[in-house]
Amino acid sequence: MNKEIKIAVSESYSVNVGRDNFELILKYLDKNGHRSKVAIITDDNVKKLHLNKLTTIFRENKVDYFVYSILPGEKSKNLTTIAEIMDFLASNKMSRSDMVIAFGGGVVGDIAGFAASIYLRGIDYIQIPTTLLSAVDSSVGGKTGVDLKKGKNLVGTFKQPKSVICNLNTFNTLSKEEFNNGIFECIKYGVLFDEDYFNIFLEEDFDYDSIKLSLVVEKAIEFKAKVVIEDEFDYGKRRLLNLGHTFGHGIEQASNYNIKHGFAVGKGIEIISQISYQRGKLKNKDLQKILLAIKKYNMADFVNFGFSEVLDYVLVDKKIFNGKITMIIPEKIGKCYLEEMDLQEVKELYRNWQREF
Ligand SMILES: NC(=O)c1ccc[n+]([C@@H]2O[C@H](COP(=O)([O-])OP(=O)(O)OC[C@H]3O[C@@H](n4cnc5c(N)ncnc54)[C@H](O)[C@@H]3O)[C@@H](O)[C@H]2O)c1
């Protein structure tokens, strides 16, 4: 069963969650009697595993398509790749009535979305997320961008896709590590908004075979949609989605990106939950549940990890505004609040956390 979720932002679009639903893309390619050409941006892994299913549909329906494949992983997410994609789009005479397709995980999605937003001052694009993380998070909401040497996601735009088509069958080829990496963004939504949703991850060993997979993905997209609709450009409520990310980004950077985003965010949620408990906000019962869920799906090795270094990155985070960081603090499972803290306070809380845990 396909489910359609509407994202009612400045330029509304819908997310389709289903199986074998690639064909839906065809309805976005006819514009005023013109059949769009398609530039598929993907990476070498996704190309090998899934591209043929998509291009078969284009061949059968006489859609002209071109494929640009990047080396997999965060290291490709830079301005050099963007310059290469600009040349690729221009060489294939892509016009403003044509379509870019982001076919892959969050790295491909962020790169292709950014490329689409600046080529010819913006052409349409569609997201086809192929990792759990990109399905439940990065493909929805219109944040695009690449990294600079100085840090992650420092260059980018807001550009909503024309549509998001999430085919759950593509997850079957994800490694356990990549799948679990995405689970942490789902656990995040549970801690933020809904204890019943959170409990799913404790009650079963959640994986791509779970009969709850589509429910988990659909609800995650609905949680994200609600926040994005209220605060499309990230000035207020959308910042809740950064739960676990302040320390999480610090962990990712201190590990030189060897610890994946989801696992780093999981550890970040653990740290901020323990800090909330130390400050008398979060009850021990909820803290223990959060710790249990994180332990269950974590696959990163934190045993010899240099936690002291994390603070160096946290204190230069790009989200610092007027010398303050907005921390997202769990009050109970299903409810968090925003608190602005100055850097000295964050430093003290982190040091106290290190002493006790
Ligand atoms: N724009 C946003 O709002 C937003 C939100 C969260 C994260 N992000 C970004 O998303 C990125 C992380 O996304 P990710 O975890 O999807 O990483 P990714 O795109 O690097 O994918 C992870 C790995 O899985 C492989 N892969 C993808 N689909 C596969 C499939 N179906 N089967 C087998 N292998 C597959 C990829 O080739 C890659 O090796 C980061 O750059 C992060 O900054 C963006």
Image (spheres, rainbow, N blue to C red):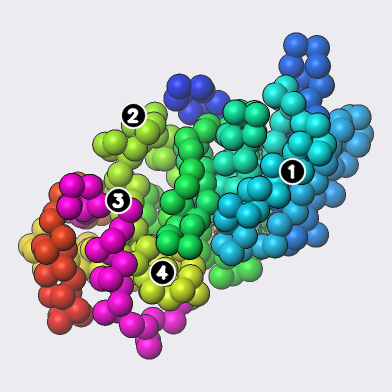
The residue shown at (31%, 58%) is 317
- Report the Cα–Cα distance between label 1 and label 2: 36 Å
- Picture coordinates of residue 89, whole percent (x, y): 75, 38
- Closer to the N terminus: mark 2 or mark 3? 2
**In this view of the protein, which residue sits in the foreground, 13 or 198?**
13
Dot in front, 4 or 2: 4
Quick one: label 1 or label 4, which is nearer the N terminus? 1
Can you identify the residue that label 1 sits on?
87
Distance of label 4 from label 2 (alpha carbons)? 30 Å
For residue 355, side relative to residue 174 (left or right):
left
From the image, which quarter does the N terminus lie in?
top right
Quadrant including the C terminus: bottom left
Q: Amino acid at mark 3?
A: Lys
Look at discs 1 and 2 and give the one toward the viewer: 1
Label 3 environment density (alpha carbons within 10 Å; few <14, some 14–19, many ≥20): some
Q: Quadrant of residue 231?
A: top left
- Evaluate if marks 1 and 4 touch, with contact meaning CB atoms under 8 Å apart: no
Residue hosting label 2 = 230
Quadrant of ligand 1: it is: bottom right
Q: Which mark is residue 331?
A: none
Distance of label 3 from label 4 (alpha carbons): 15 Å
